[in-house]
Image (cartoon, grey):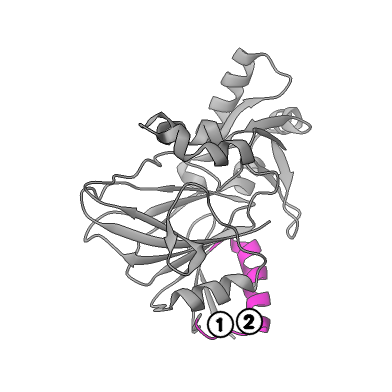
């Protein structure tokens, strides 16, 4: 069907002997199981069209749009992530996509369209491995806690720009702060995952602000430890498909001022 080559890391696998432009529903079911097990899947040499990209993603669920980014013409589901000298990346923090929503995404499928000569890798970290690594006392403390995730907190730099609040006014109204458990259960693997991230998580509910800040800083530092991380080196027409329910990620913005253009589809949870 397809070949799975696991990375020598806590998470991640390369998928070979597959053409994503014409996969079947049966193959997609196998990939979904493989995704849950490995948390992020990598594909090389996938010269697929936006229509193929959409078709592939649609096997896994309904497709989301994003309130803050431009999209491919004719494909509102395909977000353009493009950065160059005039438009440097504003996302510098480890994060899990769109946790400011009541039902965050299942995952995202990102394809590299224009890749800089050097730099521009993406880091992924396993939130299930991060939870398992905690001692029993800390695990028990976290169970039952809830944290607030906020669009406004995550996009504070964009909102601070001239006209930013006017441009994102609709998104602010549609995405009020939302509460999620600090520890979630993955629906396929049943593994416990640490569900906080530095970009969107503002504070822990019903906890003194100082204690909340200290605990979140501990968790933010913990979940990005090298032992939970794998690194993906982009090539043109490479694809990363990550499980947003159990993975944290971070772009390495070391290619500026070169052009880097990626196209992403996000699948509803």
x, y (%) of residue 58? Answer: 62, 71
Looking at the image, which residue sits at the far right? Answer: 144
Q: Is residue 195 above or below residue 146?
A: below
Q: Secondary structure at mark 1?
A: loop
* Image marks 2 and 1: residues in contact by CB distance under 8 Å: yes
Depth order, front residue of 145/159: 159
Between disc 2 and disc 1, the foreground one is: 2
Q: Residues within 10 Å of mark 1 (few under 14, many from 20)?
A: few
**Would you say 220 lies left or right of 254 here?**
right
Q: Is residue 61 above or below residue 107?
A: below
Q: Position of residue 186 (x, y in %)?
A: 72, 53
The answer to whether residue 199 is visible is no
Determine the main secondary structure of the stretch shown in magenta.
helix
- Residue at 76% x, 31% y is 140
Q: Which residues are magenta?
A: 21-40
Residue 27, numbered circle: 2
Q: Is residue 26 magenta?
A: yes
Query: Which quadrant: the C terminus?
Result: bottom right
Decide whether residue 28 is among the magenta residues: yes
Q: Residue at x 40, y 74 (%)?
A: 44
Q: Is residue 32 left or right of residue 119?
A: right
Q: Which residue is mark 1?
A: 2
């Amino acid at each position: 069907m397809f070949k799975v080559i696991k990375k020598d890391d806590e998470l991640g696998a390369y998928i070979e002997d597959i053409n994503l432009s014409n996969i079947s529903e049966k193959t997609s079911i196998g990939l979904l199981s493989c995704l849950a097990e490995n948390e992020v899947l990598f594909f090389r040499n996938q010269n697929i069209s936006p229509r193929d990209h959409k078709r592939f993603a649609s096997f896994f669920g309904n497709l989301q749009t994003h309130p803050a980014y431009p999209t491919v013409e004719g494909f509102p589901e395909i977000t353009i992530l493009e950065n160059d000298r005039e438009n440097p990346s504003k996302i510098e923090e480890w994060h899990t996509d769109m946790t400011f929503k009541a039902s965050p995404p299942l995952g995202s499928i990102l394809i590299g369209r224009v890749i800089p000569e050097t730099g521009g890798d993406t880091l992924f970290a396993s939130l299930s491995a991060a939870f398992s690594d905690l001692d029993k006392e800390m695990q028990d403390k976290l169970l039952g806690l809830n944290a607030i995730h906020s669009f406004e907190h995550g996009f504070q730099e964009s909102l601070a720009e001239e006209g930013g609040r006017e441009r994102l006014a609709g998104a602010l109204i549609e995405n009020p702060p939302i509460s999620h458990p600090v520890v979630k259960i993955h629906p396929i693997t049943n593994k416990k995952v640490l569900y906080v991230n530095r970009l969107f998580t503002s504070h822990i509910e019903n906890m003194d602000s100082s204690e909340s800040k200290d605990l979140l800083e501990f968790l933010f530092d913990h979940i990005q430890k090298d032992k939970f991380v794998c690194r993906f080196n982009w090539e043109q027409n490479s694809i990363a498909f990550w499980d947003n329910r159990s993975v944290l990620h971070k772009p390495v913005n070391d290619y500026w001022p070169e052009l880097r253009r990626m196209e992403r589809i996000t699948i509803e949870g």
